[in-house]
Image: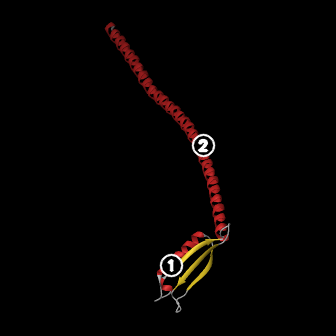
C-alpha cells in the first residue's frame, strides 16, 4: 500500500502540476487576448488623435486660404474700381472733346466765313462764264465740295469743259 500511496501522491502532484501549468497557460492566453484588445484600443485612440490633428490642420489651411481669397478679392475690386474711374474720366474727356469739335464745326471758322467760289464757263449758248459763292462750314468741306464740282461732268451733259470748270476757297 505504501506503493499505492506513493503513486496516488505522485498522481495528485502531477494533477496539481498539470492544473498549475494549464492555469498559467490560460492566464497567458487571457493576457494575450487583453493585449490584442488593448492594442486595438490604443490604435483607435491614435487614429482619433490623428483625425483631430488632421482636422485642425485642415481648418488652419482653410482659414489661410479664405484670408488670401478675401485679400485677392479686395485687391481685385479696388483695381476694378480704379480702372472704372479712369475709364469714366477718359470717356468724359473724349465726350467733351467731341462736343467741342462738333461746336467748332457747326459754327464754322471762328476767324470768318469760308466761301466756295465756283466758276463754270462755256456751257451756255452765249458761251459766257458765271461765278457762284457758297458758304461752307470750314476749309476742309470747301475743298471737298470744290473737288466734287470739278469732277462732275454729268452736271452739264454734252457741254462739259474741264478747263473752264474751276473753284477756289476763300476765308473772310
Figure quadrant of residue 17: top left
Picture coordinates of residue 9 (x, y %)?
37, 11
Locate residue 58 relative to residue 106 in the image: left or right: left
Which of discs 1 and 2 lies nearer the camera? The answer is: 1
Locate residue 89 relative to residue 35 in the image: left or right: right
Q: Tag on residue 150?
A: 1
Q: Nearer the viewer, residue 70 or 62?
A: 70
Q: Nearer the viewer, residue 22 or 115?
A: 115
Q: Quadrant of the C terminus?
A: bottom right
Picture coordinates of residue 13 (x, y %)?
37, 12
Picture coordinates of residue 86 (x, y %)?
63, 53
Q: Give the distance between the C-alpha atoms of the residues marked 1 and 2, in whole angstroms.
A: 68 Å
The structure residue drawn at horizontal position 35% and vertical position 10%, both measured from the top left corner, is 5
Picture coordinates of residue 47 (x, y %)?
49, 33
Q: Nearer the viewer, residue 170 or 72?
A: 170
Is label 1 in a helix, a strand or a loop? helix
Q: Tag on residue 5?
A: none
Crowding around mark 2 (Cα neighbors within 10 Å: few <14, some 14 to 19, many 20+) is few
Earlier sequence position, callout 1 versus callout 2 = 2
In this picture, is 3 found above or below 127?
A: above
In this picture, is 74 found above or below 125?
A: above
Q: Nearer the viewer, residue 170 or 49?
A: 170
The structure residue drawn at horizontal position 62% and vertical position 79%, both measured from the top left corner, is 133
Q: Quadrant of the N terminus?
A: top left
Crowding around mark 1 (Cα neighbors within 10 Å: few <14, some 14 to 19, many 20+) is some
Is label 2 in a helix, a strand or a loop? helix
In this picture, is 99 found above or below 51?
A: below
What scheme was used to colour the molecule?
A: secondary structure
| Residue under numbered circle 2 | 71
Residue extending furthest top? 2
Amino acid at each position: 500500500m505504501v506503493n499505492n500511496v506513493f503513486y496516488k501522491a505522485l498522481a495528485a502532484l502531477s494533477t496539481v502540476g498539470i492544473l498549475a501549468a494549464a492555469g498559467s497557460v490560460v492566464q497567458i492566453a487571457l493576457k494575450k487576448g487583453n493585449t490584442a484588445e488593448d492594442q486595438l484600443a490604443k490604435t483607435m485612440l491614435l487614429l482619433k488623435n490623428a483625425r483631430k490633428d488632421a482636422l485642425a490642420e485642415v481648418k488652419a489651411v482653410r482659414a489661410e486660404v479664405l484670408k488670401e481669397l478675401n485679400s485677392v478679392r479686395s485687391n481685385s475690386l479696388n483695381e476694378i474700381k480704379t480702372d472704372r474711374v479712369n475709364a469714366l474720366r477718359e470717356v468724359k474727356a473724349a465726350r467733351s472733346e467731341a462736343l467741342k469739335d462738333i461746336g467748332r464745326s457747326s459754327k464754322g471758322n471762328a476767324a470768318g466765313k469760308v466761301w466756295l467760289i465756283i466758276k463754270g464757263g462755256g456751257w451756255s449758248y452765249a458761251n459766257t462764264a458765271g461765278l457762284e459763292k457758297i458758304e461752307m462750314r470750314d476749309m476742309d468741306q470747301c475743298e471737298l465740295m470744290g473737288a466734287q464740282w470739278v469732277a462732275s461732268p454729268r452736271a452739264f451733259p454734252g457741254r462739259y469743259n474741264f478747263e473752264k470748270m474751276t473753284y477756289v476757297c476763300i476765308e473772310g
